[in-house]
Image (cartoon, rainbow, N blue to C red):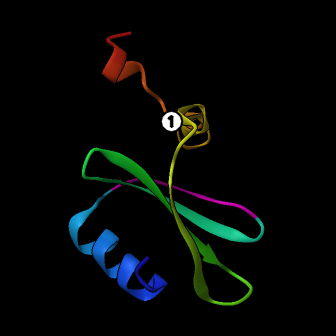
Amino acid sequence: MLPIEEKAYLLCSRGELIAAVATSNYDISLYALDGEYVELYYSIAYNKIEEIKVLEDHLRLDIYTRNMDLSTLLGD
C-alpha cells in the first residue's frame, strides 16, 4: 500500500539485486527481499519506475537465467 517511490527505496535499500533484463520498453530488475522475489519495472520511454510486484510465477525466473552460464554453479 506504499507509494511506488517508497516501495522502490525499500526494495533498493533492503533487497538484493539478483539479475536484470532489458526489453524494448522496460528494464526489469529482479530482487530478493524477505524471502520473496520482487520485480521492478523501469520504463525506458517515461524514464520512471512504473511497477513493483512480487514474483508469483517462479517459472518466470527463466527470463533472468536463459542467457547465463550456470555450469559453474551446477558443477558441469
Crowdedness near tag 1: few (<14), some (14–19) or many (≥20) residues, C-alpha within 10 Å: few
**Residue at (54% x, 38% y) in the render:** 61
Instruction: Report if residue 22 lies within the magenta region.
Output: yes
SS class of the residue under badge 1? loop
Q: Is residue 29 left or right of residue 51?
A: left
Query: What is the total number of numbered labels drawn onto the structure image?
Result: 1
Q: Where does the magenta region start and end?
A: 17-23
Residue farthest front in this picture: 1
Q: Is residue 39 left or right of residue 21?
A: left
Instruction: Report if residue 26 lies within the magenta region.
Output: no
Q: Which residue is mark 1?
A: 68
**Residue at (63% x, 89% y) in the render:** 47
Compared with 45, 37 (above or below) is above
Q: Nearer the viewer, residue 34 or 31?
A: 34
Q: Amino acid at mark 1?
A: Met
Quadrant of the rendered image containing residue 62: top right
- Where is residue 43 shown, x and y percent of the image? 66, 79
Q: Considering the whole magenta stretch, tell me its main secondary structure.
A: strand
Compared with 26, 47 (above or below) is below
Q: Is residue 52 left or right of residue 25?
A: left
Quadrant of the rendered image containing residue 49: bottom right
Quadrant of the rendered image containing residue 74: top left
Q: Quadrant of the N terminus?
A: bottom left
Q: Is residue 37 left or right of residue 22?
A: left
- Where is residue 18 shown, x and y percent of the image? 37, 50
- Where is residue 13 shown, x and y percent of the image? 23, 74
Residue farthest top in this picture: 76
Compared with 67, 3 (above or below) is below
**Residue at (35% x, 47% y) in the render:** 36
